[in-house]
Image: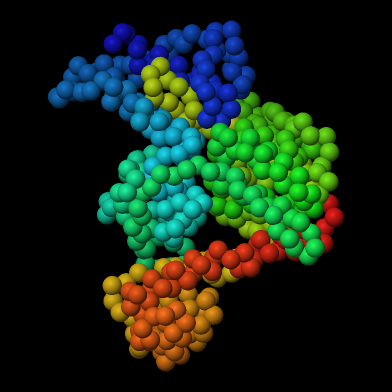
Amino acid sequence: MKKHGLILLILCAMFTSSVGTYAGIKWLDKTETAKGGAEYYEPTITEDLAKVERAYQLILKEYVEKVNRNELIEGAVQGMIEKLNDPYSVYLNEERAKQLNDSLDSSFEGIGAEITEVDGNIIIVAPFKNSPAEKAGLKPHDKITKINGEGVAGMDVYDVMGKIRGPKGTKVVLEIIREGIKEPLTFEVERDTIPIETVFSKTYDHGGKKIGYIELTTFSRDTGKEFKEHLSKLEKTDIEGLIIDVRGNPGGLLSSAEEIANELVPNQKPFVQIVGKDGNPEKIYTRLKQKKPYPIILIMDRGSASASEVLAAALKEAGGYKTLGETTFGKGTVQQQLQLDDESHIKLTTYKWLTPDGNWIHKTGIKPDVFVMQKDLFHLHPVQTDTILKRDMNNEQISYAQRILKSLGYEPGRLDGYFDGKTENAVKAFQSSNNLPITGVIDKETIIGMEEKVKEELEKPENDQQLMMALKLLEYQDR
């Protein structure tokens, strides 16, 4: 390696830029100025970086065992990134960079769940729609503690992602901790090809009005284009209102959120404000001159993050449209994928984003105009036991079963985990209604029957209280 090679490598990373979040990479030449206002220049050796160079040379020369030079370089870069104490800024070697790019493409193999790091914990932001993760019962804000029996303490997001992903047809076992329960839950998830279908639409006839509905599951490269196509088709049917659903949408490309905002948000206010190192907000406006001739409501929840929050804030503050549901995740920063002088990258937080009114929602989220919680049906925990549950037993798994029975309309009498006569009667009633042996005990067959019935009920629009409230509000709203 040439003298000062390590230092040049690190400095080059500091002065690369890309077009849009996670967009193609370009290098700044010596005459360009970076977005934050810092002029690009040929790096020189300072005392601080000379110290890094000295440590590198000493390790190569004096360390008792042979050292891999590339591993030292990667370790130096990782060390600088870790000192930022920012879970969204990470070093991506060639393999990790490919993982990130794959997640923005048309498909990849895995379980289909967006994860992040919060206060040192690996958290599921949201499972993708119809993914193995969603079907297995994983939920937003689940904390991953083990993967195939191995603890994740000390791992970063990309370490965890690498262990979760794998070939289609293989299985991964996740142990998670969920808010509100005492014992960890275990999920065996079979990996599959995860298609990145990001836009779904339909219409609802409600209260004599035709209401359009568009669900956005993530913001990938084609999401903006797909949204325009779906919206155009809906408008040709003369819709009288529109619901945009970003529940469980973990975000993605800011450019895709901008494309969608261009269709919906008038340009009297900026749809978003971007703040770099200099602290001066850059206000970004849409091209749209007037609001849509019909009312719009956006539905959001705790799994709505990042670009979903950009769109929600734009519709709420710049568009004057209503938001409904629950407070969002709270991610108010923007990352760019910056290329080093090989195939590795740094995904670096380069900007904060502010809402049209100048609010920073980081770690606090966006509160809805209309707060609506879902039914208990949407917050049930799976029964996980190898023991047959029966009369006079008392444990947490029985409490989960009682809550499932109650949500399905079978009254167990209590929810505290004690298996009394009324719970036994509720179990028998459930078994009778679902063609199961009427034993009054909760065995494996009964647990599977409960799971299938819950999934069936979750698919019914009438059980979706947030959707029903949005339809009701649009029924009485003219614009």
- The residue closer to the viewer here, 259 or 7, is 259
- The residue closer to the viewer here, 354 or 264, is 264
Residue 210 at least partly seen: yes
Q: Give the x, y percent position of residue 193.
A: 40, 44
Residue visible at 38% across and 39% down in the picture: 158
Q: Viewed as shown, does residue 423 lie left or right of 65?
A: right
Q: Give the x, y percent position of residue 306.
A: 58, 42
Quarter location, residue 62:
top left
Q: Viewed as shown, does residue 43 lie left or right of 38?
A: left
Q: Give the x, y percent position of residue 370.
A: 72, 60
Residue visible at 61% across and 22% down in the picture: 36
Q: Viewed as shown, does residue 44 lie left or right of 459?
A: left
Q: Give the x, y percent position of residue 84.
A: 46, 34
- The residue closer to the viewer here, 262 or 44, is 262
Residue visible at 73% across and 38% down in the picture: 263
Question: Taking 108 as reference, is 11 above or below it?
Answer: above
Question: Taking 72 as reference, is 332 above or below it?
Answer: below
Residue visible at 14% across and 24% down in the picture: 64
Quarter location, residue 208:
bottom right
In the rendered image, the quadrant that contains the N terminus is: top left
